[in-house]
Image (spheres, rainbow, N blue to C red):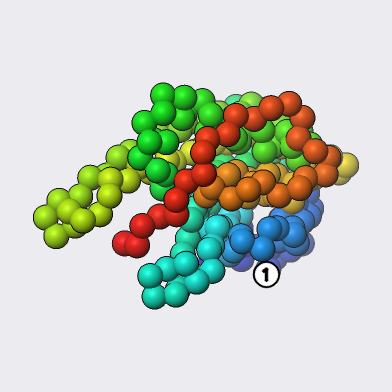
Amino acid sequence: MAAAQEHLADSADETPIPFRQAVEALRAARLRPEIETGPTPAPKRLAPYAYALEAAVVERGAGPDGEDRDLADGRLVVLHQPAGDETWQGTFRVVTLARAELEPEMGADPLLPEVSWSWLTGALEARGVQYGAPSGTVTRAGSYYFGGLAAREPATQIEIRASWTPAEGPGGVPDLAAHLSAWCDLLCQVAGLPPAPVDPPPRGGVVALPQRRGPQAR
């Protein structure tokens, strides 16, 4: 378990209150039933305090033998620098990774990088969260199979890495539950799931690509 997580459990008096409250809200967030989350070791050198979780969009009983199948997965890390960070333009930073396998024709779409980034910004806007200093990359990679794997169809993987600074609310605490929900909306988007109702409804239009198939059995 990450140092900051142990710190939360064992030395709460020394953990900054804004960080502790933000992480507690993150843990209590209510997410779509298709989303499974769990804690994962957080990076120790990026900030004095860090908390990380991993998540997956799970399709129940969709595997070849009736097992559950992951349609998309990723990781979300919350960093906290009580003194503030000039690059972040704040005291908190959210760092995320989302990845999934797409239909080959989707992977060939020249607009895929721009559309994928719009999925992220659209998800944040739909949840009404305030943020600044966003940055990130969209990577796509194709896989072709030969020899004993020649029967498998070509596959395209997409990976979205992004970070942003969440706006701080009362007491310097950002609404990380809303940021987590928005990031999970992104995971569901790349997994090809229909959007869940959001209150308030999304503002503006977000470009969508056709539904994709789930990952092939590995």
Q: Nearer the viewer, residue 139 or 14?
A: 139
189 sits left or right of 99 in the view: right
| Left-right relation of 91 to 1 | right
Q: SS at mark 1?
A: helix
Q: Position of residue 115 (x, y in %)?
A: 53, 29
Q: Is residue 62 visible?
A: yes
- Residue drawn at point x = 11 percent, y = 55 percent: 147
The residue that appears at 74% across and 51% down in the rendered structure is: 177
Q: Position of residue 46 (x, y in %)?
A: 53, 43
To which quarter of the image does residue 169 belong? Answer: top right
Identify which amino acid the numbered label 1 is placed on: Asp
**Which residue appears at 68% of the width and 68% of the height?**
9
Q: Name the foreground residue: 38 vs 160.
A: 160
Which image quarter holds the C terminus?
bottom left
Q: Is residue 89 left or right of residue 158?
A: right
- Numbered-mark total: 1
Residue 176, percent from left and from top:
73, 48
Compared with 121, 100 (above or below) is below
